[in-house]
Image (cartoon, rainbow, N blue to C red):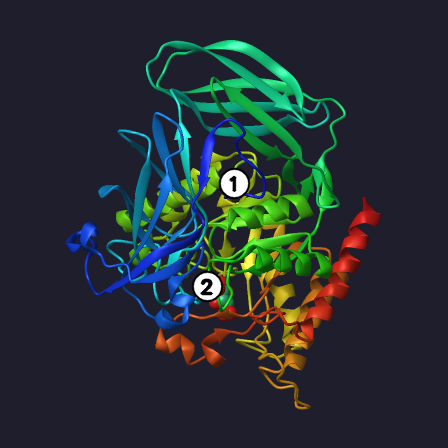
Amino acid sequence: MLRRFREHDAREVRDLGGIWDFAFLGEVEPDDIDVSEIEFGDRMAVPGCFDATPPYAGRRGLVAYRTRANLPHGKRHRLILDGVHHWGRVFVNGKALRDHVGGFTRFSTDFEAPAPGEAEVVVLVDNRFDYQRCPLHLDYFDWYHYGGIARGAELHGLGEVWIERLKVVTEDLAGRRLMVTICYGAEAVPRQTDLSVSFDGEVMVNEKVDLKEPAGEIVRTLEVPGAPLWSPDDPNLHLLHVRLGEDDMRERIGIRQVRTEGRQILLNDEPVRLVGLARHEFHPQSGHGLPDQVLVGDAQLLRDMGCNFVRGAHYPQDVRWLDLCDEMGILVWSEGIGWQHKADHLTDPRFLEAQMAHIEEMVAGAINRPSVIIWGALNECDSDDPKCRPGYEKLLGRLRELDPTRLISFASHRPFDDICLDLVDIISVNCYPGWYHGTLADVPKHLNRIAAHLDSHGYADMPVMISEIGAGAVWGWRDSHGDLWTEQYQSALIEAALRHLLVETDRWCGVSLWQFCDVRSSSARARILGRPRAFNNKGVVDEYRRPKMAYEVVRRHYREARARNKRDR
Ligand code: ADA
C-alpha cells in the first residue's frame, strides 16, 4: 500500500513493495543496456536505497531492479512509483515505457497486457549526477543524494473508465461546502456511466453521467453542515469515496481554509503561529527510503516537542509521512527540490522545465492534504539577482495557478537585498546569526535587523517567518567551554532564537528550526570540510533520533507557544 489507508475498494491493486532482484551496473549508459541480459545477482528492499546498504554504500552508477507481479484484472494497467532516485527508466515485459527525472515525486506509466498472467517489471535507476539528464539533483547540495526506489510501488488494473484523481476544495467554511473535482479517463466515448460520491459513508451524489471526452472532469458540490473542521489541535479527517463505473477512489480530506491577513496566518479564520522544524527524509540505514517505524517515530518526536509545523526540506515528502501529518495535525510546508541555484540554472530552459514538471507532480501528490498549507520552491537561490527573478516568477506563478487555495513562499537567505519577496504570501528567511557570523548576543540583534529592514521596505503588513536558524552540535559532545559543535552551544543558540522569536516579539508568524535530525551531507569535498563526520549536525536529534540538549529547549518553547496561541484565540 502506498498510503496509510486503502485508496481503492473496487480497483484491483498489487502492492509491489518487498524484496526485488538487483544488479549494480556501474559506469554504463542506460541506452547501452539490454535488460534481458542483466544478471540480477543481488537483492534490494523496495522501498529503500541501494547505496545505504553495506556493499554499495557511497557508490554511484546505473543499477537495475526487477520484480514479477501477477497482473491485476483490467484492460489497461498502471504502474505507479512514488520516488525513484534520481533518474529512472521503467520496463514492463522487456519494453521501455518511460523515463523519469527527479526523485521524491510520484509518477506512473500505463501499459496494455495481451493476456492475464505475470508481468516482469524492471526499473533502471541512476544515482549519478548529470546536469544534462537530471538538472534537479546536484552534488553540491548540502544533503546526500541516495539512489534507489526509495518509496512505494504499485500495479493497478484499470477498466474502460477510471478515476485519475480527485481534488477537493473547502469552498465555504461556515457552510461546509466542498467542491469535488473528479478527473477521469475513458476508453470509447461518449458513454454513460454511474457516478456516486459518499462522505463519511453517506451517499451524497448518485446519478448517471455522460462522459464526453477521453479525459475530462466532473465537478460536484457537497454540503456537509456540522462536519467537524480540521486543525492542528483537532485534526478531523473525513472519508470521501467516489465510484465511477467499475472504478473507485477513496480520499481522506480535512475541511479547512488557510489565508493570511496582515502579519498573521489564519487557519479557519483563527491566527496560528507556526512552531516546527525543517526535516530531511533520512536514516543512515535506509537513506531516503524510510521504514514505517522511522516515520512514526519522527512524527511522535515532533508531537512530543509540541510542533504544529514541519518544513519538508528540501523536496516533497513521502506520502506516508504526509498521511501521518494529516492524522496528527502537523502543518506542512511542501517544497520542490532546489538548493542555492544561481542565474546559470535559473535562466536555463532545461532546468526550468525539469522544475516545472517536478512541482506539478508535487502538487498533484498532495493537493487534498489538509496538513499541507504552504507550497515552496527554490530554497536559498539568488533571489537578489534580477536575472533570477523571471525563474522565480515562473515557478511561483505556476504553483499559484496549480493551487490558489494554499500559501506560497520560498526560503530566502538574502533578506536585505531580495527582489522577489513581492511574489509570496509569507516571507521566509533563513539565517544563521551566532553560527556562520557573530556571537550568541547577535542572535536577537540580527533578527531585529531583518524585521526592521522588511518593515521599512514595504513588507510591514506581511507575515514573516524564520524558515531556518540553528547551530551544529555533535551528539554527545559536551564540554565546559561550550564551544561551537558542543550540545551546550547549540542549545544556548536555540534558546536565544526561540526566546526572541516566540516570547519577546510578536512580529514573526512562525519558525522552523534547522533542523530535525542530523543528515549525511553532500559528497562534495569543499562542503564536507565544514561538516564534521560528513554530516550536517544541526539536528536537535542525531541521525538515530537520539535527543541532544537542545531538544528540551525546543520542547519547552514550542509547548508554551502552543498554549499561548490557544489562550489568545
Ligand atoms: C542553508 C540550507 C540548508 C543547510 C543550512 C546549513 O540554510 O538551506 O539546507 O545547508 O544552510 O546547515 O548551513
Query: Mark 2: few, some, or many residues within 10 Å (few <14, many ≥20)?
Result: many
Q: CA distance from mark 1 to mark 2?
A: 22 Å
Amino acid type at image mark 1: Ala
The answer, for residue 455, to whether it is visible in the render is no
Asked which secondary structure carries label 2, the reply is loop
Q: Residue 400: x and y, percent?
A: 48, 37
Seen at 33% across and 39% down, the residue is 118
The answer to whether residue 520 shows anywhere in this view is yes
- Which residue is identified by label 2? 287
Q: Which mark is residue 121?
A: none
Residue 470 horizontal/vertical position (percent): 59, 69
Residue 119 appears at what percent x and percent y? 31, 40
Q: Disc 1, ligand 1: is the CB inside 8 Å?
A: no
Q: Which residue is mark 1?
A: 366
What percent of the width, then of the height, locates residue 111? 30, 33
Residue at the image position 66 percent from the left and 90 percent from the top:
481
Relative side of 226 to 254, left or right: right
- Along the horizontal axis of the image, is 32 left or right of 25? left
Check if mark 1's residue and mark 2's residue have beta carbons within 8 Å: no
Neighbor class of circle 1 (other Cα within 10 Å; few <14, some 14-19, many 20+) is some
Q: Amino acid at mark 2?
A: Gly
Q: Looking at the image, which residue is at 36% across and 16% down?
A: 213
